[in-house]
Image (cartoon, rainbow, N blue to C red):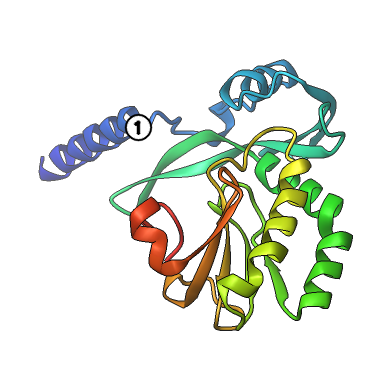
Amino acid sequence: MKRMILALLLAAVTASALLLTGCEKNKDDVKLKTASEMQTYVSKALALPDAEYKSQKDEGSDKRVFTFKDRLCGFEFEAVSEKTKKYFDATVVGYAESTSVNWSEAYYGYLKDKVSAEADRIAAENGFTLNWNGTVDNAVFLFIDTDRSSGELAPVIKELGSLIKSEDKHGKLASHEIWCVSKAGSKNYKDVTAFYEFDTGELRDKSERAEFRAPDHLNG
């Protein structure tokens, strides 16, 4: 009798977990997105109506990779539909479809490719190092390792920022910044000495930050 009660309780808990997590008990019952469904997701959920569907590749029965082309800029990116485990109190209770898109990384790569030759020249001529951040989802677009003052850097960083902004066809960098850091390789706010704002086109000393904006939405 006790075993029956425990079994019923376990079944009830599992059923509740499935409802809460919106998943299927059996992986085979999970449906991957079709090409048309992914096109809709990319166009509406990601606000990329100009994305052109190119191809589909199934990687086994649990993963489907779609390739799209960004018509505005010409680069390709991938959207993935796959079956993933769902957990309830650290226990696998079922499976669900999960969607991911690498557009932000692909767009960052596009911007970097467009400006890197000129950016590298500017860095070499002015004795600093560029550390690219990898995705436009990060509010800090670029880190610059330098021990020079913001006064010395201002004309150079403004030139660099203007160069990058000129290639931003999707207008994603309005709230982004370039950070100048005193410690090589650092991405920590405590090492920032100056920050360039894409929206204003200004390079400001770190001491000015509190007057213009808080660091909370950024790294560190």
**Given the image, on which type of amino acid does mark 1 rest?**
Leu
Q: Quadrant of residue 148?
A: bottom right
Viewport quadrant of the N terminus: top left
Residue 152: x and y, percent? 64, 74
The answer to whether residue 214 is visible is yes
Q: Tell me the residue at 23%/37% (across/down).
A: 13
Relative to 167, 16 lies left or right: left
Name the foreground residue: 59 vs 191.
Answer: 191
Q: Tell me the residue at 70%/32% (across/down).
A: 170
Viewport quadrant of the C terminus: bottom left
Is 57 drawn above or below residue 177 in the view shown? Answer: above
Residue 210: x and y, percent? 34, 59
The residue singled out by tag 1 in the image is 18
Q: Tell me the residue at 75%/81% (across/down).
A: 127
Residue 16: x and y, percent? 26, 31
Relative to 62, 14 lies left or right: left
Relative to 198, 161 lies left or right: right
The answer to whether residue 59 is visible is no
